[in-house]
């Protein structure tokens, strides 16, 4: 462990850029002292607490590295912007690492960047490959820390850090709810080596002043008779699969009504632990039967929650897999007369226009909501299965133009299920970001989301949540409900089918209440007591002060403007300034490039032609280089148009021309080169380069051409 700085270690800093909240102060103080699992509802400032801890560890250990880990790249980027605005650090001190950055580049960034934001997979890989200097790690923040169970990358990376001898590294976990049960929470505590768990919810008096009212309405929907009859017929087809597993001694229950996909997965995992001695054909029989049974249980859940249209697509997907992939278990299953009879029955009902009663009730809720609102309000509909997203969106289209609907799903195209082609296609991360931006804006006012919308991402203010199906997990329910009531009162409507979903929702509420009681009991969990790493803040003076902030949304939902003028970057330290180049080229570059401070959304869209103070422009140009170098490639629009390709070619030609010019020719070529650069910058937004690294190269070359004396003159 690095030694704490003797001067900086005399105080710890608490930012006053936001109104102080006592619970945040106490959470930050505890997390500074020891490894802590911070449990706070969505929207109440977990990221702010993390930023305070990171900022102080950065001060205390100048040679150390502080790390923020989040489960997805969009969330990594979002949290990096929020933390930077809260901590008031320069952009050149922070970097975002993704798997698209080459290992050699990541290694060099680990060496020079004191603050790193990345996904757990990249962190784990860099630790395993010894790219990350583990001995210099002084603080790690793990967002959505409830994931740190079993073989998740969170558990792997904390284990690696401890194995490498860095026991004193501070580990701070952030989560709205740290687990679905006591056992899962205890596993998280062990994996994160937590010495304490601090939990608040909306009922706590410390939090109540900052929480808006959320009204929860439960609507029970009778089971449609046609769905009930199909359900009974489909359940009888599960019976032979369960009986086969029971005869093999790997399953206890063979009642289709008491078996779920999760139950079968647990039974399969338990069986696999003792299956090594079995013959290969025996293992194949059990594995294939488990797979078919789990697949059919999933289909029954789709039928129960989302109706015959989604179930019909599910059946078509199974038939396609059986014929195209030649999956033996599915071929045998789909060839049975009972399966053919079920398909015919479902086909006839769907052709007659049958749909789940939930669809009509959902449309009714939307009509009532928008008819009662005089201004623009936002709605999220959470759906468990992607199979239902497309069908629900198609039905909601009937409410145009009042309702403008979009879908928000993960990247995979029906991974793990038989509906890869029929389900709504997955969205890559750039499309996901575009959907979120359109929803936060005015293009859409209703978003249908799968589980990807539950965690962390900045979706914006939401007035109404419709939970289309019931969940058993308290963690996911808390995350969903946290999407409303953040800046004003919100409403939650839960749609439950009579029977199974009613029971599931009741079980979830009972489990949630029990879990809350356990989280408030200090004796319910066993905590780590490390020999090193604990700090005594009683010996430190707390200094409250404002920090330099850039304009960006924070986890508290506050947007602020810069309170101080931008600080001039030390260009001599960042880039070696050579004596090559000419004054006219330098002056013209400075005169045409201005960085818009208020636009951090896309680096390429921040340039415009104009004039400004040269020292300010020079400093901003340095920041542009670092910003573009660290910007994730998916954040840059990759144009497939001919115009975009032409822009890329012009950039490459400009770089080649610049490289070929020697000092005697440069003066003559200045005007032509400058004209090409200016033309590209003006058109950069509408014709962005396919490779933003070319843009970085252009600016870096321009800076390298500046004369030392000219730089000093500009600074004066």
Image: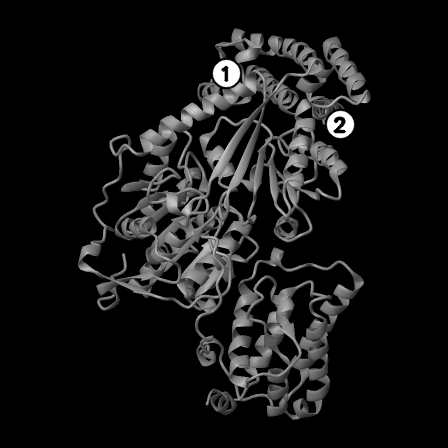
- Seen from the viewer's position, the closer of residues 402 and 22 is 402
**Residue that badge 2 annotates:** 324
Quadrant of the frame with the N terminus: bottom left
Left or right: 19 as drawn, with respect to 258: left
Q: Residue furthest left?
A: 539
Percent across and percent down for residue 166 are: 30, 51
Give the secondary structure at mark 1.
loop
Percent across and percent down for residue 247 are: 53, 6
**Camera sees residue 299:** yes
524 lies above or below 546: above
The image's colour scheme reads: one colour
Distance (Cα) linking label 2 and label 1: 30 Å
Percent across and percent down for residue 489 are: 50, 43
- Seen from the viewer's position, the closer of residues 609 and 505 is 505
- Seen from the viewer's position, the closer of residues 137 and 23 is 23
- Seen from the viewer's position, the closer of residues 493 and 525 is 493
Counting every numbered tag in the picture gives 2
**Residue that badge 1 annotates:** 278
Residue 266 is tagged as: none
221 lies above or below 491: above
**Camera sees residue 269:** no
Q: Nearer the viewer, mark 2 or mark 1?
A: 2
Left or right: 318 as drawn, with respect to 20: right
Q: Tell me if mark 1 has few (under 14), some (14-19) or many (20+) residues whose alpha carbon lies within 10 angstroms of its own.
A: few
**Who's the residue at 24% across and 63% down the image?**
11
Q: Tell me if mark 2 has few (under 14), some (14-19) or many (20+) residues whose alpha carbon lies within 10 angstroms of its own.
A: few
Mark 2 or 1 closer to N-term? Answer: 1
């Amino acid at each position: 462990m690095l030694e704490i700085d003797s001067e900086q270690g005399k105080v710890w800093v608490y930012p006053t850029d936001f109104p102080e909240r006592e619970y945040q102060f106490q959470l930050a103080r505890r997390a500074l002292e020891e490894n802590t699992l911070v449990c706070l509802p969505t929207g109440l400032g977990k990221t702010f607490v993390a930023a305070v801890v990171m900022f102080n560890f950065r001060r205390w250990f100048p040679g150390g590295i502080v790390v923020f880990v989040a489960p997805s790249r969009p969330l990594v980027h979002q949290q990096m912007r929020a933390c930077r605005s809260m901590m008031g650090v320069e952009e050149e001190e922070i970097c975002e690492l993704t798997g698209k950055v080459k290992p050699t580049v990541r290694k060099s960034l680990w060496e020079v960047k004191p603050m790193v934001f990345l996904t757990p997979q990249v962190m784990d890989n860099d630790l395993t490959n010894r790219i990350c200097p583990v001995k210099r790690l002084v603080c790690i923040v793990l967002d959505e820390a409830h994931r740190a169970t079993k073989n998740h990358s969170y558990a792997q990376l904390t284990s690696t850090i401890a194995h490498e001898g860095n026991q004193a590294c501070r580990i701070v976990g952030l989560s709205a709810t740290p687990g679905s049960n006591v056992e899962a929470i205890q596993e998280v505590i062990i994996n994160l080596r937590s010495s304490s768990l601090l939990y608040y919810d909306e009922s706590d008096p410390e939090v109540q002043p900052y929480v808006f009212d959320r009204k929860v309405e439960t609507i029970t929907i009778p089971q449609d008779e046609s769905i009930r009859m199909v359900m009974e017929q489909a359940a009888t087809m599960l019976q032979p699969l369960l009986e086969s597993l029971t005869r093999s001694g790997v399953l206890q229950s063979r009642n289709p009504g008491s078996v779920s996909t999760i139950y079968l997965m647990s039974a399969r995992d338990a069986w696999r632990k003792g299956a090594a001695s079995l013959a290969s054909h025996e293992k194949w029989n059990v594995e294939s039967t488990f797979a078919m049974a789990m697949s059919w249980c999933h289909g029954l859940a789709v039928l129960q929650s989302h109706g015959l249209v989604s179930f019909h697509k599910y059946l078509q997907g199974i038939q396609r897999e059986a014929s195209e992939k030649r999956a033996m278990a599915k071929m045998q299953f789909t060839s049975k007369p009972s399966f053919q009879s079920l398909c015919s029955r479902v086909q006839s009902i769907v052709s007659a226009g049958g749909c789940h009663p939930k669809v009509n009730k959902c449309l009714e809720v939307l009509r009532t909501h928008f008819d009662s609102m005089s201004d623009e309000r936002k709605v999220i509909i959470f759906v468990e299965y992607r199979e239902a997203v497309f069908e629900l969106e198609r039905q909601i289209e009937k409410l145009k133009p009042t309702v403008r609907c979009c879908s928000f799903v993960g990247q995979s195209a029906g991974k793990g299920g038989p509906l890869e082609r029929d389900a709504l296609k997955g969205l890559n991360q750039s499309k996901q970001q575009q959907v979120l931006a359109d929803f936060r804006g005015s293009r859409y006012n209703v978003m249908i989301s799968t589980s990807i919308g539950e965690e962390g991402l900045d979706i914006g203010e939401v007035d109404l949540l419709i939970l289309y199906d019931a969940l058993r997990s308290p963690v996911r329910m808390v995350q969903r409900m946290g999407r409303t009531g953040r800046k004003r009162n919100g409403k939650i409507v839960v749609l439950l089918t009579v029977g199974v979903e009613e029971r599931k929702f009741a079980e979830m509420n009972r489990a949630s209440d029990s879990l809350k009681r356990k989280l408030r009991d200090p004796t319910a969990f066993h905590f780590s007591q490390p020999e090193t790493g604990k700090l005594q803040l009683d010996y430190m003076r707390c200094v409250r002060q404002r920090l330099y902030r850039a304009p960006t949304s924070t986890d508290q939902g506050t947007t602020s403007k810069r309170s101080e003028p931008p600080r001039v970057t030390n260009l001599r330290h960042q880039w070696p300034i050579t004596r090559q180049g000419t004054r006219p080229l330098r002056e013209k570059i400075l005169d045409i490039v201005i960085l818009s401070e208020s636009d951090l959304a896309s680096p390429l869209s921040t340039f415009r032609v104009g004039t400004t103070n040269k020292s300010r422009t020079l400093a901003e140009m340095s920041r542009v280089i670092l910003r573009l170098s660290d910007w994730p490639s998916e954040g840059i629009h990759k144009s497939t148009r001919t115009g975009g390709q032409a822009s890329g070619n012009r950039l490459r030609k400009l770089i080649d021309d610049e490289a070929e010019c020697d000092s005697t020719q440069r003066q003559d070529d200045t005007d032509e080169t400058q004209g090409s650069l200016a033309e590209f910058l003006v058109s950069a937004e509408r014709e962005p380069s396919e490779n933003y690294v070319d843009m970085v190269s252009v600016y870096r070359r321009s800076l390298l051409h500046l004369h030392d004396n000219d730089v000093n003159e500009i600074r004066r």
